[in-house]
Image: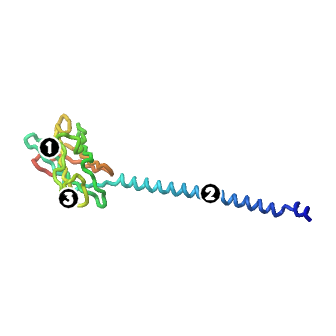
Amino acid sequence: MWKKLKRDERAFTGLEAAIVLIAFVVVAAVFSYVMLGAGFFTTQKSQEVVHTGVQQASSSIELSGDIIGEGNTTANRLEKVRVFIQLTAGGNPVDISKTLITVTTDDAHHSFTLGSVADSSYFKVANKYGGDSDNLLEKFEKFELEINVTKEALGSSTDITANEKFQVEIKPPQGASVTVVRTVPASIDSVMTLY
């Protein structure tokens, strides 16, 4: 009887098959866990990219009101441009001291930041409405930017004169820029609205 039990390996073969089956199930579970983890990681990274792209593409500032020009009637030239800006709805606060202002004419392309020019008459925050005294544009605040557009400030050979087109780009530290293209009127006044 002992010999019959020893030679009968049917139960042992079933046990081997069960062990192999369990090993396959464990390997499949580990593989699926790794694949799901990689999928979740990829989805999270894609979501971060989308949020960053939307934040970079949308502007956090907008124009508020007219663009005002100050002219020199004797020299028949545009000397200063006043731009009023505020936050867009739901926009994050913007540090104006890190905001880049670029003025482009037919023969000049010059950029300013608040700290980049020794003479504050080239670019400054002329007035702040509805807020505190810092250079952070926040909710319910409005800033009046004064930009000097004379040939001395822009480093150009000629001034901006009557019927001449120019561009002012306001680029905050984060988000899309706001571009303003205006034409100087045929008759230059000491104070005028630029269209």
Kindly identify the amino acid type of the residue bearing the numbered disc 2. Val
Going by the numbered disc 3, the residue's amino acid type is Gly
Instruction: From the top left corner, tell me how far across and down residue 94 is, in percent.
Output: 28, 53
Rendered view: 82 above or below 12: above
The CA span between labels 1 and 3 is 28 Å
**Amino acid type of disc 1?**
Glu
Q: Secondary structure at mark 3?
A: loop
According to the picture, the residue beneath numbered tag 3 turns out to be 131
> Would you call the spot at circle 1 few (<14 residues within 10 Å), some (14-19), or many (20 or more)?
many
Q: What distance separates the C-alpha of mark 1 from that of mark 2? A: 71 Å
Quadrant into which the N terminus falls: bottom right
Give the residue at x 22% y 58%: 141
Secondary structure state at the residue bearing disc 1? strand
Q: Residue at x 20, y 51 (%)?
A: 83
Q: Residue at x 63, y 59 (%)?
A: 29
Label 3–label 2 contact, CB within 8 A: no
Dot 3 or dot 2, earlier in sequence: 2
For disc 2, the marked residue is: 30
In this view, the mark in front (3 or 2): 2
Q: Outermost residue toward the left?
A: 74
Q: Earlier in the sequence, mark 1 or mark 3?
A: 1
Q: Nearer the viewer, mark 1 or mark 3?
A: 3
